Image (cartoon, rainbow, N blue to C red):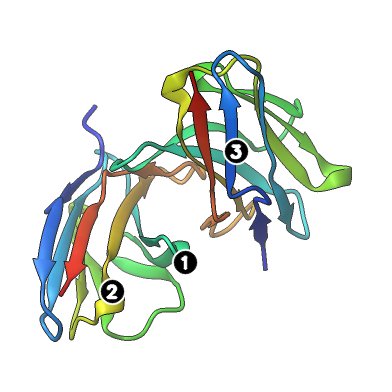
Amino acid sequence: AQSVTQPDIHITVSEGASLELRCNYSYGATPYLFWYVQSPGQGLQLLLKYFSGDTLVQGIKGFEAEFKRSQSSFNLRKPSVHWSDAAEYFCAVGASGGSYIPTFGRGTSLIVHP
Amino acid sequence: KAGVTQTPRYLIKTRGQQVTLSCSPISGHRSVSWYQQTPGQGLQFLFEYFSETQRNKGNFPGRFSGRQFSNSRSEMNVSTLELGDSALYLCASSNLTGELFFGEGSRLTVL
């Protein structure tokens, strides 16, 4: 069965600083990988996804993520954080082929200081 | 293109009652999934419907049920509500690319 670990429950950064959110997954084959963001009181919005090909994936709002098969990781990065990026971030892994119901990590709460 | 619409957005029930939540997917999406989100357990998968058939089911008791109609709209029902059922219930639709499109959720409080 697939699983996702987001080791950091909370991350605090200053506005303008760089950001890296960690995600490690467990899956026997090539996974589908996703990062979603959830603002307070809202549903989840897809930031970016990896299915195959280039391991560096660009997403919306200036985010990017890199798939590293050797480390089973899919870390999310942003070079300069804005106060509006404060939210909950979820990494998810889905099975490639067949039923693709993704498994979500527990989430990382991002706090941005002015 | 309209997004995923969930109703009601907020509701309060008492223990023992039942509740029905509704989800209208993005036009053309035939897959609808439901998730329960709580601070303690995170996002937990309830079930997925595709073309009116339940295709996948999570590890929840039989009090949680759902259905999908021919127009892809879906409902989920929770019977005999317990305090622990208080949560944000999220619906997501998909066009089977693997990407989920979420609604804003229905916030259920059980007193």
State the residue position of label 1. Answer: B41
Could you tell me which residue is drawn at 45 percent across and 73 percent down?
B58
Between disc 2 and disc 3, the foreground one is: 3
Residue type indicated by callout 3? Ile
Could you tell me which residue is drawn at 47 percent across and 25 percent down?
A85
Element under disc 3: strand
Quadrant assignment, res A32: top right
x then y, percent, for residue B16: 13, 86
x then y, percent, for residue A29: 77, 55
Between residue B37 and residue A33, name the one nearer to us.
B37
Between residue B109 and residue B58, name the one nearer to us.
B109
| Marker disc for residue A11 | 3
Instruction: Mark 1 and mark 3 in contact? Answer it, CB < 8 Å.
Output: no
Residue type indicated by callout 1? Gln
x then y, percent, for residue A105: 58, 54
Q: Are marks 1 and 2 on the same chain?
A: yes
Element under disc 2: helix
In this rendering, position of residue A89 left or right of residue B46? right
Q: Is residue B10 above or below residue B1?
A: below
Q: CA distance from mark 1 to mark 3?
A: 19 Å
Instruction: Mark 2 and mark 3 in contact? Answer it, CB < 8 Å.
Output: no
Quadrant assignment, res B108: bottom left
Can you name the residue that lies furthest to the front here? A114
Q: CA distance from mark 2 to mark 3?
A: 29 Å
In this rendering, position of residue A113 left or right of residue B88? right
Between disc 1 and disc 3, the foreground one is: 3
